[in-house]
Structure formats: C-alpha cells, structure tokens
Amino acid sequence: MKYLKTVLPMEINEIPKAASLLISRARDFEVLLFSEAGSWPIKYIWEKMAAKDNNYNKVFFSSKITSFSKSPLANQLCGLLTITERKSKLSQKKKNKIATLLNSFNDEFKGKITNQLLNQNVEKIIHYISSMGLIIPSEEGLIKQNKCFDNNISTLSKNFIDFKKKSVSYILSDLPNIKHEVRPILQIILSDTKFGKAIKSRKVYVFDEIISRGRTINSIEVIINSFSSTTDWVMGVVYCPKFYVGSKIDFVYSDKKALPTSNRPDMIGEVTYETVFAFETKSLTNILPNTRVKNEDDISIYNSEIAKFNSRYFPKLKMLNKTSFRALLNLYFMADDKDIFEKCLHLNLVESVSLLEEIAFYITMPFPLSDIIKRNKFKKESRQVLKKLECSITNSDFSDNLNKLKIKYYAIRSIIIKSEIASWIKTNTKVIRELDLVLEEVFNGK
C-alpha cells in the first residue's frame, strides 16, 4: 500500500525562524491569543522578544482552543475566564438584560433559561446554555466525509491530503453561515470579563501550531463572538496543508513541516488538560510527586515483567512498541473511565487520578501529522489491546498474570511516576537550551 506523504516535525533550531515570522505578523495587533499547548514555542519566543523590544509587548491570553468534537464549547469559554469570574454570580442588571432579550425567543427556549439557572454561578450557566442553537453547517458536512475516509483505506491513502485542503477552504467560506442562537446572551454574561473587555472593538491575533482540517477555525469564530460582536481576528500557524493567505488565515509558515512539540508535554514542560468546567495548565515541576526514587531496580524489574507479558499475550503487535504498550497498560490499571482512554486517543487529556498515566501514553502516540493510516492503525491496535484486557476471564492464566502486574504497579507507582516526570523535565530542559542558543545567535545578529 502506498502511504501518504508524512508531514515532518521540524528541527528545534528551525523553530525560532518560524516563530519570529509569525510574531512579526502580529506587530499591529492589540491583543494576542496563544492556543495551548501547541503554540508554546511561539509564546516562549515571543516572551523573549518582548523582554528585549517593547514593540512586542501586547495584551495576551493563552488558552486551549480545539475542535468542538474534541472538547465542548463550554470548557473552552470557561478556559478564558479567571477562576473568580467562573465562580461569580450574575448581577441583577445582567439578569434583567437577559430577561428582556428572552422576550424575543420562543417559549421552548425561554423555558430552559429559568431564574433558577441564572442564580447559579457563571461556569454552570455557560455549561448549560453555551451550545444551545449552535449550528456549524461546514462541520455537519465534514462529519459525513470523515466517515467515508475512516471506512475506506484506499480512498484515505489517495485523497486525504486533498480532502484536508478542500476542508479548510470550505470552512473559511462557510464561517458566515454559523448560527448561534444563544450568542447575545453569552455576550451579556461574558462581555465584562477580563478577556471580553480586552478584545472589545480590537484586533486579535491568534497563534496556533496546526491547521489540519480547519475545525479549530470554527471554534475560534464561535468563541471570539461569544465574548464580543465587535472584534476582528486572524490567525497565524506553523503548518497548514495549503498556503492560504486572506480571510481569517494571515500567515502559514509551511505545508510540509510542523512543530515537533505537538502533543508533547515532555518537550514543552507543561500539560494542558480538561477539567469538569474548563481547562487548566500546569508545569510538570508542579505535579512532580514528593517521592524519592529509592530503588530504580524495582522499575527495571517491573518493565521486564511487562515486556514478558507483552511477548506472551500480544506477540503480533505492530504499532505499539514496548514503551507505548507499557504506558497503555499502566493507564488501564489507573483509569476509572473508558472515556478517558478515548479522549487520550483523540489528543485530549482530562483531569483524573490517571492524568500522569495519560501523559505517559499520550507522548508515545504517533506524531499528529504523520501518515493518517499509521495513526488510525495505532488507535485500532490500542483499542484491541484494551478490549482483550477488559475481557480477561477470571482465574485464567492471562487474568492472574495481569492482576499480578496491576498489584506490582500500585506498589511502585509513585517511584515510576517520579522517574517518568524527571525524564520529561530533562527533555524540556534540553529543548529550552537548544532554543535559547539559537535565539542568542539571532539577538546578537549572527
């Protein structure tokens, strides 16, 4: 089978060039919005540039922005609020404005937005109403096409890149057709938040690492307009399947290379994950367990036992290597919800007791822009392994050995996690060191 051309991760020493070109495009914009966590290298370099040149000092925000198929609108809206804003209650003035506005809505809609609801805190109101009357025609059309590609490997191999190019064009042309019935109410709730006030009647430049199929463009449009109806925005990205200029895409660095840090918390040194109501970002150093790795021999013995289990019961795996199999198994031991595993496969980490195991598995997955057939096979094989683990027959040889590994993992989990995070921090330190060396040369005019 002929595989697709793979989008390559660029070398670390090329990142400053890509970031600098993106940042230069935003000089005349009043507000910057960095999409977490993919745009971390751009944000890091911008902060370095702003420290040396006041012309780069801007009002900026950083938050998770992704397609609504991966994370709901409500979480992404709340991610742009401070904790105080999320927990606050609506003023009587805002309630009165909403009550007046509701007179123009139908009875079914008015029946859902009750006084009892409006007495809740802001994050609960947003979670209840944010997606009411939201229609994105371009995504409804894309869902049908995606199913075609998912079910037809030969079509996928030949036409997927063309599909992505057409998808981006389609979404850009269809932005004016987005309908969001509850938008005026959201604007009443959100307009005087820190983000809402910052972007009102201003131009916002959005930085992101990747445009793949273009669904994030829809998300940005809906999110910005939920805060303000008078804000203009454009975006600059490192990778897009086609060099678009105009409309909402201001700049594309490459149609062949992307940031190597994509979905790599170990490289960027922080993790962005979904909570019940929003998103949070934490430095890896802030989640490092206060545990001393007393005996790394325990980890080596455990890894050896996992490798034997792998060889004995899963000898025909092709996509999962030893590291990814071990990470998947550890996640299985800790995850209390299968949806956590699925969200991880769809590149979305969620807050749970297994967050660290999610990260460990997440970073073993194929590069997000590598051959889609390869990525789909990785997902399929991962689900097959999970299914066999869940269907193990009690008291069978397989089940007994699986339980022994689970008990062993629980016993030494803290030192395994300590060792994993230490390794991730080491990777991040190396990335920063390489970036700083290149930046120093740039700043010194070399």
Image (spheres, rainbow, N blue to C red):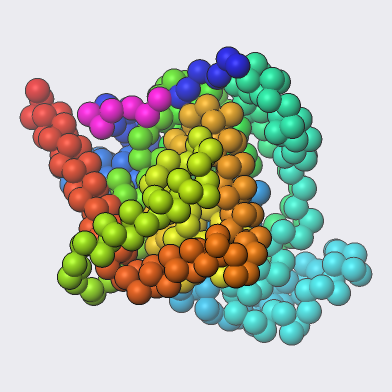
**Residue 360 sits inside the magenta stretch:** no
Q: Tell me if residue 407 comes above or below residue 361 in the rendering.
A: below
Q: Looking at this view, is 414 or 159 the one in front?
A: 414
Residue interval drawn in magenta: 8-13
Residue sitting at 82 percent across and 73 percent down? 112
Q: Toward which corner of the image does residue 227 lie, by quadrant? A: bottom right
Q: Is residue 116 left or right of residue 26?
A: right
Q: Looking at this view, is 429 or 28 the one in front?
A: 429
Residue sitting at 63 percent across and 20 percent down? 157
Q: Tell me if residue 90 comes above or below residue 44 in the rendering.
A: below
Q: Looking at this view, is 362 or 109 the one in front?
A: 362
Q: Tell me if residue 124 comes above or below residue 443 in the rendering.
A: below
Can residue 9 be seen at all in this image of the molecule?
Answer: yes
Image coords of residue 88 (percent x, y): 53, 79
Count of numbered labels shown in the rendering: 0
Image coords of residue 292 (percent x, y): 19, 72
Q: Tell me if residue 280 comes above or below residue 144 in the rendering.
A: below
Q: Looking at this view, is 85 or 347 the one in front?
A: 347
Q: Is residue 234 left or right of residue 417?
A: right
Locate the C terminus by quadrant. Answer: top left
Residue sitting at 45 percent across and 68 percent down? 404
Q: Is residue 182 left or right of residue 42?
A: right
Image coords of residue 172 (percent x, y): 64, 31
Image coords of residue 218 (percent x, y): 63, 42
Locate the N terminus by quadrant. Answer: top right
Q: Toward which corner of the image does residue 46 lie, by quadrant? A: top left
Q: Is residue 316 left or right of residue 148?
A: left
Can residue 333 be seen at all in this image of the molecule?
Answer: no
Residue sitting at 39 percent across and 68 percent down? 409
